[in-house]
Image (spheres, helix red, strand yellow):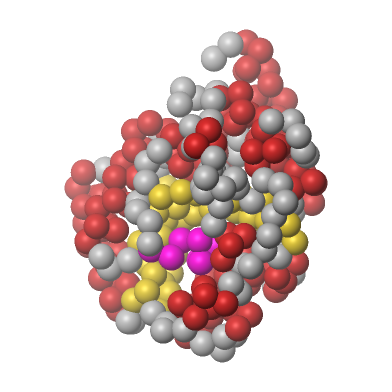
Amino acid sequence: MSSQATTLKRMAYEKMRGSSLRVLAVSSGKGGVGKTNFVANLAYALSKRGEKVLVVDADLGLNNIDILLGLAPKKHIGHLLSGEATVEDIILHGPADINILPAGDGLQELTQLPPEKKILLMDELDRVSQGYDFLIFDTGAGISNNVTYFCSAAHETILIATTEPTSLTDVYALMKTLHLKHAQKHFRMVINSVSSEREAQGVYSNLTAVTDRFLKDISVEYLGYILHDANVPKAVRQQKAFLELYPFSKFSVCINELSEKISKEKPSPLSSERDQPYFWRSAFQVQ
């Protein structure tokens, strides 16, 4: 790292020391596990608790969360990166006063951002994020550079898995990549679409049995579970937040419990890295 980069990193660290902003990256090893639906409803629940939330659709090139919530963006992150718009021009106002930064639609160039574009995006997010309590990255699935970048740039990484064997093998691969390439050591796990908490605990135990054996330096925290609910596809088709349509369903109860737990937590760094501002922790790493 150059002396200039080191100086910038130190300046940013001093700037962010007093910030109460929590930056969460929500990711998964594979698609189809309900990750974006989880992000949308977690943001909704946090906002209903009085938290100010900005969701960044970090699956760059494939907009998802705005479609899920029935929003119609006129501009997206691509316009920000090209200098055609500011963050303020792009932000959408969703249900429960969630703010959303939409991704582009079918833009191949956004799927592999060069380092200078990543820094530009993070600089803009840092500029506008001071008034928020939570910034949530809804990353893509898999282990692409964009996915690992946003995960390594966050304070906390929440991984979504289901009972499917492919979901578990792929989320293991993501943890391994983040650990080996970005030195991440702590992950939080949510098991989605289960029939009971006992089933979720079983899935978590099976996964940690593997990580304990082959990734000895990492810790995987059980954050919670979400019960299967037959109404989830209905909410998706109606392009509404599930909690808005079915506030008393078992799915909503699980999401509200998770949001309460997350909201009440006081961030306590697990390492010195967690103290660093979220973007400078990874902006100067080799991608």
Where does residue 162 sit, x and y in percent of width and height?
33, 66
> The magenta stretch spans which residues?
33-39
The structure residue drawn at horizontal position 60% and vertical position 83%, both measured from the top left corner, is: 245
Where does residue 17 sit, x and y in percent of width and height?
71, 39
Q: In the displayed image of the protein, which residue is found farthest to the top?
A: 3
Where does residue 53 sit, x and y in percent of width and height?
69, 59
Quadrant (top left, top right, bottom left, bottom right) of the N terminus: top right
The structure residue drawn at horizontal position 59% and vertical position 31%, both measured from the top left corner, is: 118
Residue 37 belongs to the span the image colors magenta? yes
Q: Nearer the viewer, residue 256 or 128?
A: 128
Q: How many marks?
A: 0
The structure residue drawn at horizontal position 66% and vertical position 12%, both measured from the top left corner, is: 4
Where is 272 relative to 115, above or below?
below
Q: Quadrant of residue 224?
A: bottom left
Secondary structure mostly seen in magenta is: helix
Is residue 217 in sight in this rendering?
Answer: no
